[in-house]
Every structure is written in C-alpha cells, then in structure tokens.
Amino acid sequence: MSDLPVAQAKGKRTYKRHLGNYLLDKRLQLRYVAFVTILSALISGTLGYLIWKQENRATEAVVDDAAMNMAAADSAKSKAEWSEIKEFIRSELHSDDNNLILTMVGVGVGLVFVLSAFLLIMTHKVAGPLYKVAGYFDKMHEGHLGDVWPLRKWDMLKHFYGVFKETHDTLRERAQHDNEAVGRFLEACSAAGIGRDGEVGHALDELESYKKSRDEALA
Amino acid sequence: MGGPKNKTYKRSWKNLLLDKQYQLSFTLLMVGVSAVLMVVLGWWVNREAQRATEIFLNDVKDCRVPPKQAATPAPDHDRSDVVITDIGEMTMVAPGDDKVAPGDDKGASNEEPPAPPDEGAQPAPPPTDEDQPPVPDDDSADSAQASAQPAREDRSMWPVDAACQKIQSHKRQELIDGQHFILYVLIGVGLLLVFGLSIYGIKMTHHVAGPLHKVSLYLNKMKDGKFDTVYNLRKGDQLVDFYEHFKGAHAGVRSMQEEDVARLKAIIEAAEQHQLAQKSPEVAAALEELRAIVKRKEDGLV
C-alpha cells in the first residue's frame, strides 16, 4: 500500500476492477486465504479418509463374500484360479475406491479454490477502500485537500469511509474559509490603498502567493 | 507536533465488535459460504458412505453353502434351517496351513459332522485372513454330485453357515457404525466450522477494525480542529502500513496548520506595526478575523 496513485481527475469517476489489483494488501488478504485453505484441506482430508475407509471396508466385505459364494457355487476351479478371481474383483472394486480418492482430492482442491477466490474478493472489498483512503492520506501529507469520491457499490468499511470523508470535507471547508478570510484581508488592504512597497508590501505579497498555493492545494 | 509514543491499550472481549457492520457482514458471509460448501460436501460424503454401506447390505448374499454331497445327503426337513457350524468342514485351507476359519458354534456342530480330510483334494480358494468365511471343499465325491445336483442349484436350499453369518453380521455392524461415525464427524465438523469461523472472523476483523477505530477517533479530533499526538498501534494489530499513511496525513495537515499560524502571525505583526487597522474598518475587521483563525489553529496544535 506504499505506492499510491494521486488522482486528480474531476467529475464522476468510474473504477474498473482488475484481476491483478485484487491483492491490494497481501499481508491482510493472504492471511485469511491461508487460514481457510489449511482449514479446507484438513476438512477435506479427514472426510476423504473416513469415506475411503468406509468404501474400503465395504469392498473387502463384498470381495470376501463374492469369493465365498462363487467358490460355493463352482467347485471345479483350483485354489490358484479362485485367488486370481478374487484379486480381480478386489482390484476392480479398489479401482472404484481410488477413483473416490481422486474425486475427493478434486473436491478438496475445488473447495480450496472456491473459498480462496471468495475470500480474495471479500478481503479486496476491505483492502480496496483502505487503498483508496491511503491514497487520500498521501495527498493530505503533501498538503492537498482535493475532492473525495465515494466508494464503489459493493465496497465494505462504508462507516469508516464516511468518517474519513466527513473529516476531509470539514478540513477542506475550513481551509477554504480561512483562505477566503485571507482573501478578504488582501482585498481590504487593496481597497484601503495600502501599497505593495516596503515591509508591509512584501508581507502582503508573500501572503498572496501563500493564498494562491493554498487555493491550488484545495483544487 | 509530538512524535508518536507508545501507549498501552488492553484488549477486552467487549470491544471485539468495534465496527459491527463490517465485522458481522464479513464474518457472516464467510461463515455462510463455508456452511453452504460444508453442507454440499457433507451431503456428498454421507451419500457416498451410504452407498458403500448399501452395496454391502444389498450385494452380500446370506451365508448359505452348498450341501456336502457325498458325505451328507440332504435330510428330510428344510435344509435352510440347518446351521453348519464346523468351519473346518467347509473351508479349504491353503496347503500346509492348518488354520481354520473362526466361528465355531459348538452347540450345533453335531448336525453335520466334519468330513474327513481328503488327501487328494484340489484346494479351493484360500481365505484372505482369519475372518475369511468358509468356502466349500471342491473335491466332494464325484459319485454324489449327480444326486445332490438339485440341492446345489437351489441356493435357498443350502444350509446357513453360522460362523459366516456371525462374520457378516460383524462386518455389517462395522459398516453401519462407520456410516454413523461419518455422519457424527460431519455434524461435528460442521458445527466446529461455523463456531470456529465465527470466532476467527470476528477476531480477525477486530485486528482490522481496531486500527480503523483508532484512526476514526483521530479523524474526529481533526474534524474538531484538534491535531494532538498520534500514538502507535497495539501489538498484533493489522493495517500497520495503512496506519503509517494516516500518520503521514496527520503530520501533513498539522504542518499545514503550523505554517498557516506562522504566515498569519507574520502578517498580523506587520499590520500591527504599521497600524493597518486604522486605514479602514474593512481592514480592521479582516485583521480581527485573521486573529481569530490564528487562535483557533493554535488551540488545535496541542
């Protein structure tokens, strides 16, 4: 949030969201994303293991039962042949179990992706206003009190932004009022025929240029 | 301007919700989306667990084994009531392996006496482990095969193997228990997720809302024209960079005020020295206005 643009444009301004700008405050945003990613991975892993265990248990039971029933129905085959058949059934069912693992990994990755994307967008709605306010802070640091534009529709921190905008507007109005008072003094001096020569004249010149710089800062 | 100093603030759970709108909306959205995903995932996981259990319950046949053709001709009564209890009779063990499948209901063992071991028997498929249900001996007497053929073809006529039934019942219960366990884990994880994420969400947003609350207090002071000392954030607060921007802004506005005071004081001093107020009432009024501005600004620079 250090290199902030100093926007000077006037009139209604529209901001476009860019994919690259979604990570405005890496430290803030990635903290949430990392937490939820780890949590999702843990949950998916645990559930995946449990369901795989259940499938595996069912597979073993079915294999044992199928082998026993086939053996009971057909006694002509040898032990080796039955072993082969049993292994075939087992490998078929285990292949289904392995597909389930792949599905679970896919679901886990999908969960992590969806939650991360969601959190990235959510945190962007916080980081966006902060980025904007930080830009105005930088301008204030340089002595500029220009116009403050409203937040985007879906941005968060609206209350904080309201406080900031109110303060900024008050400071700006007060500075304008003070500048107008200086202007009135300069006009009164000019109307009273006070010349711009000598010590007083020099002070008035300096005050006038100072007023001009303040007017520019408020533009 | 006084430099930033360290002032210690104590965190209190009462202050966790500093910006209700932001904190609650952020947390509720996060919890809501996670809960929806968890429900979908849970539904799928539960369905898969149920499917696995149902495959066993539907596909696994009852524990009936074909009658021992030669040695044990079918009795007159219904063979489905007969319970074979001697696994040794029905199980083909691997060569050199003396192990017999478990499940020996001795009480009924005299219904079908164990057949003598057949020396020249071709071994049937071996059990995978000790829980392996019995498999029939495949080298029953050839002469008996023809007479026992109807009984062998009609599975419902086969006797029930009690040991096998016991094992199946155990496996069935294991699968049902496993399914229930998965359901409980799902409910537990779901509740933990909702409560955990709620607490985490509020705590995490508090680390953001805290500095913002502090900045808001300073902004309100600035609005009232007060530019006093800005203190550092608490340890563990986020938005450290943002706070630095704020401190820069505060310092910038404060130095503007100081510069204004210096400029206005200089012109007021020059005006007083040269008695400009006496030149016209307008000049006098404007000068008075400048004095009021200087006083206000000086009061704000505590």
Image: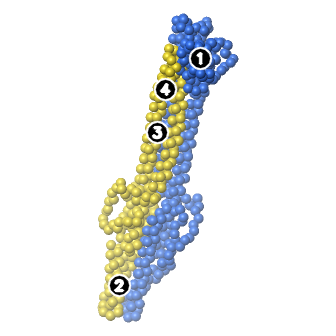
Q: What numbered label is drawn on residue B261?
A: none
**Residue type pointed to by label 4:** Glu
Tags 3 and 1 touching, CB below 8 Å: no
**Residue type pointed to by label 3:** Met
Tags 2 and 4 touching, CB below 8 Å: no
Label 1 marks a residue whose chain is B
Tags 3 and 4 touching, CB below 8 Å: no
The residue under the point 48% across, 65% down is B240
Give the Cα distance between marks 2 and 4: 98 Å
Give the Cα distance between marks 3 and 2: 74 Å
**Residue type pointed to by label 1:** Met
Q: Nearer the viewer, mark 3 or mark 4?
A: 4
- Residue B253: image location, x then y, percent: 42, 75
Q: Which residue is mark 3?
A: A104
Label 3 marks a residue whose chain is A
**Residue type pointed to by label 2:** Leu
Q: Which residue is mark 2?
A: A207
Tags 4 and 1 touching, CB below 8 Å: no
